[in-house]
Image: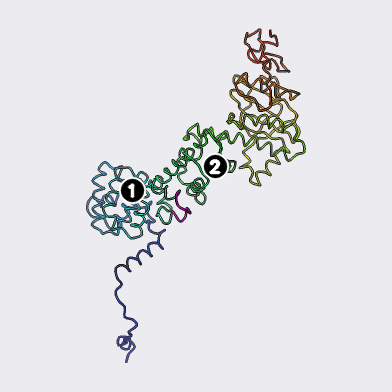
Amino acid sequence: MTLSQEVNGFIFPGLKHRRPRPRRLERAVDNVERAAEGLEIPNDLENFDYVVALAELNSGNATRRQVKRLAAGGLNLIEQLEDGKAVLGSLLAAVDALGRGLLKSLLIGYLISQNPDSWVLSRVRLFLLERKNDLPMVWRNRVNQYGLLSSDVGLHCSKKILDAETFDAASFASESGLKGIKGAGGVGYRVFQALSKTLSTQHDKRNLDRYLEFVTMEENIRFRSHLSDYTAALLAPYLSSAPSDQDRLRIEGFLVTNFGDPRINPGAWRGADVKYVDVLKRWLAKASLELLLNVVSASNDTKQWEQRFKFWGHYFDQGLITDAWVALGPAASVEARRLVREGELSSAADFGLLSGGGVQADHSVIMFRLGDFTITEWTHSGKVRLYDPRNENIPRFYERRYDTAAIRNDTACDLALVHHYSWRERLSGYIRFELGLSPPKGINPVAQTRTCRGCRQNLHVLCFANEFTTRCSRCGVGSSYG
């Protein structure tokens, strides 16, 4: 007997099997779909010739492959066609004719398209809703549980994210189907938008944690071009209140890391509401003051700066200062770079450097804008100098290098005051007179005024206190006063 005869005549009962029940087959398909989650989007969507496919569709000769790729990646193109409504009708008819297996491709095309409220996607959404029960079980469950075809999908999913007992961004993306490119389309944006709107009204630790986890990917963030949503979500709650130091540092770090410092690169922040950007700038201004405190604290000579830090901190704490910048001496900059390495500063761009002679290596200066005035203050020996907004010699903010002699030039400023006895009383009185701002607690401001014979204005006594030029800071006429 030949081998083939033996094989053909062999009967083994164990090889018998029953036809699986439909329910078991559906579960098996479900498991295969989950395992192939990353393979369900055709990998040639970008290189696919949509023009040829559309021509074949219009002539009634489109292949299954062409219809599948048009459904998954051609909806935005159809929206731009003059006869788009007719073309879409032909595509949906082809999907029906070729079987329910193409419904998933159409659903994916709906998810990755950018505008779910367009006429194309509105029609596709209704088409899919009418055939929802014919979707593969995995996607049918996702549509039901996460409202993927609902006009309120953003609100529905955002509530799931914020109200769930626990939240894991990777699990949410996988379970909802909004993973990878499918989470970067219009439906994913609706979820992000709804989350941002909720966060813009109030923060608590859990909501902020979940928002930042949701938007953060491996080396990127979701919807980076929507800066206005981010600023409203993260800064709107603090227009009239202050966050905890921990939350401030997290929000500040997230925004500066992903969008840059708005003081240094204002162009990158053009899409954001100015009132929200000002909140961040106030925080960064306070950070500049704290930077100096950290740097100076590394030395043994902190007595002068501690008094000045406390005085100016009163105005910083009230959110009255939105622009501030630090220029460090050589030794101070070394200490600052150590803070950068240890993560206490976001980057070396957080300060400028002093150059030229006339300053000790560990001395530094901070410049800031209070009301209409620009003020420079030193950590150690050095006068406090004020510049009127009309002064052409005002130091420029956010430069990388500053000439020490220029900042110390008394002829360039409008007011130069030595930190002698009662300097806080005199300076706080001047600030109250000029800007109407209350003095720091425990300081009794000098309220004395004089009248300039040149401009005949009733001015605070410090308007005549520029010790180098002895001139009226308003009209420049000598020191004559009545």
Indicate left or right for 472 with 145 as reference: right
Q: Mark 1 packing: few (<14 Cα in 10 Å), some, or many (20+)?
A: some
Q: Amino acid at mark 2?
A: Ile
Quadrant of the rendered structure where residue 141 is? bottom left
* Part of the protein shown in magenta: 162-172
| Colouring mode (rainbow / by chain / secondary structure / one colour) | rainbow
**Residue at point 58% right, 28% down?**
320
Numbered badge on residue 251: 2
Q: Is residue 270 magenta?
A: no
422 or 16, nearer to the observer: 422
Q: Earlier in the sequence, mark 1 or mark 2?
A: 1
Which of the pair 419/261 is nearer the observer?
419
Q: Quadrant of the N terminus?
A: bottom left
- Any mark on residue 396, and which? none
Give the structural element (helix, strand or loop) at label 1.
Answer: loop
Q: What's under tag 1, amino acid-wise?
A: Ser
Vertical placement of residue 310 versus 212, above or below: above
Identify residue for label 1.
Answer: 150
Does residue 190 sit above or below 423 in this rendering? below
Label 2 SS: helix
Q: Position of residue 71 (x, y in %)?
A: 31, 52
Outermost residue to the left: 60
> Left or right of 258: which side holds 110?
left
Could you tell me residue 364's position as x and y percent? 70, 33
- State the residue lying farthest toward the front: 442
Q: Please say if 179 is above or below 467.
A: below
